[in-house]
Amino acid sequence: MKYSEVEIKRLMKIKDMSLDDQVKVNILNFIRTIHLNNQDFINSSFGSKFFGELPMTFQKNAGQVMGLITATVDGEVRKYVFNDQGYEEIEDLLQLMEK
């Protein structure tokens, strides 16, 4: 999903957010923070952890062009890659290889 302020605002207006929408909001807000802090994404490193109903980790070493997000949703572990422009679920990317 491409990062967009409009998408964040749209999601935030949802009253009863699904867990998938909550994951989207958390990821897009993390990317938003990178933009608000004017961080140089490639030269930055991240090792953030979110606790609570949707535990998530955001990891990236300085010099890497992509980072890794791990989210636990209803006991299921989901992994995503992200950069300052958006994110994708790894499973969706792997399906491209099978085609």
Image (cartoon, grey):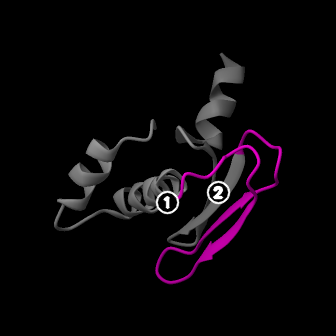
Nearer to me, 80 or 66: 66
Say which amino acid is labelled 1.
Thr
Q: Dot 1: few (<14), some (14–19), or many (≥20) neighbours within 10 Å?
A: few
Instruction: Please identify the quarter of the rendering in which residue 58 is found.
Output: bottom right
Could you say where residue 93 lies in the image, as x and y percent from the top left?
Answer: 64, 32
Determine which of the numbered discs, if any, sits on residue 69 in the image. 2
Q: Is residue 83 magenta?
A: no
Tell how many labels. 2
Comparing 26 with 64, the one in front is 64
For the point 49% across and 60% down, the residue is: 33
Name the residue furthest top: 99
Residue closest to the far bottom:
52
The answer to whether the residues at label 1 and label 2 have Cβ atoms under 8 Å apart is no
> What stretch of residues is rendered in magenta?
37-66
- Image position, residue 37 (x, y; %): 53, 58
Residue occupying the point 64% across, 57% down: 69
